[in-house]
Image: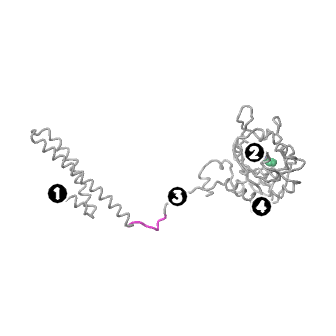
Amino acid sequence: MGDHEKLLAQISESSDAEAVNKIREAALEQLRSAVPGLFASIPELPPAERKARGQLANDVKRQNEELLAACKAWFESAELRAERSGAGFDPTIPGTRPERGSLHPLTRVTRELEDLFTSMGYVVLDGPEVELDWYNFEALNIPRDHPARDMQDTFRCDPQGNVVLRTHTSPGQVRAMERMKPPFRAIVPGKVFRQETTDASHEHTFHQMEGLVVGRDLSVGHLIGTMKTLLRGVFGKELEVRLRPGYFPFVEPGFELDARCPFCTQGCSVCKRSTWVELLPCGMVHPNVLKSGGIDPEVWSGFAFGLGLSRLVMLRYGIDDVRHLLSGDLRFLEQFA
Ligand code: PHE
């Protein structure tokens, strides 16, 4: 066996990384120093000797490369063996946790409310966020020049203003009436848009949940009972409520329903020291709205409410700035994981 073969055999039989490394260093050294010299010397030789010198140079180069390849293979298989042996592996060290997402607080509260309302016989409906002026205003008893339009600064999608970003979920009322035969109960959760200057309590995009019940002989009593059930579901306890008159052209009478502050008895920052929180605009569906939805107001009556989902989520989790909700900031969202 020549020296070269011996070295190759030595590498493949070796269990000694240091020895293999030494062979590798030597081979590298040869490649770097001897090989270029051998090639460079060829032109200076008499022509008869050039061929032999060229062959020698190529042999040295090839042998070195073989040695390097053998060393590389040795280290690779050694690494594999070490890994497979399990040595140096500590099963008690905690693994790296994969990052997990979580439900957005708005999604959570929406789902909870959907569960609550479906258990009371409501269906969950969806409506378009880009809405016709007809559904957003006209059909809700708010004609074009009605001053009530000023209450909701509207994003318009066309110069004539026939298409708008819905400013509330109430267009879902009329769409529900068109789709379903009375009696029925429906909720319409979703995103709404208003041209607002944003601050801690105003955002141009926020969430509401409309509720609509159409039946025979419905009264304000039914409305209050439903609202109390809703609040019990959300806050997990009975809350005293009060009604104040509220003006919305699509309900008559219309109310603002306040609940006793769920967080205090004496007044706190949430209820602005009043012990009441303003929670739910609501009222009995105006006959004109029933008519817009193709329902005879002589036969049927209804009540509706417009739950401020964003506000409810803020109350529920003690969030002090509405802008956090849609910020997409992980530092905020991770708190709900
Ligand atoms: N849509 C109204 C708003 O966003 C709220 C509302 C809904 C009031 C249903 C009464 C009945 O201001």
Q: Which residue is most to the front?
A: 181
The answer for how far apart the CA atoms under marks 1 and 2 are is: 88 Å
Question: In the rendered image, which residue does mark 1 sit on?
Answer: 3
Q: Position of residue 193 (x, y in %)?
A: 71, 43
Pointers 3 and 1 in contact (C-beta within 8 Å) = no
Q: Is residue 306 visible?
A: yes
Mark 2 CB lies closer than 8 A to ligand 1: yes
Question: In the rendered image, which residue does mark 4 sit on?
Answer: 232
Question: In the rendered image, which residue does mark 2 sit on?
Answer: 168
Q: Which mark is residue 57?
A: none
Q: Earlier in the sequence, mark 3 or mark 4?
A: 3
In depth, the one of 158 and 148 nearer the eye is 158
As helix, strand or loop, the secondary structure at mark 3 comes to: loop
Q: Position of residue 65 (x, y in %)?
A: 24, 51
Pointers 1 and 2 in contact (C-beta within 8 Å) = no
Colour approach in the figure:
one colour
Q: Amino acid at mark 1?
A: Asp
Q: Quadrant of the C terminus?
A: bottom right
Q: Earlier in the sequence, mark 1 or mark 2?
A: 1
Q: Earlier in the sequence, mark 1 or mark 4?
A: 1
Q: Main secondary structure of the magenta part?
A: loop
As helix, strand or loop, the secondary structure at mark 1 comes to: helix
The answer for how far apart the CA atoms under marks 1 and 4 are is: 90 Å
Q: Residues within 10 Å of mark 1 (few under 14, many from 20)?
A: few
Q: Amino acid at mark 2?
A: His
Magenta residues, as a range? 87-94
Question: In the rendered image, which residue does mark 3 sit on?
Answer: 98
Q: Amino acid at mark 3?
A: Pro
Query: What residue do we see at 73% from left, 49% from top?
Result: 208
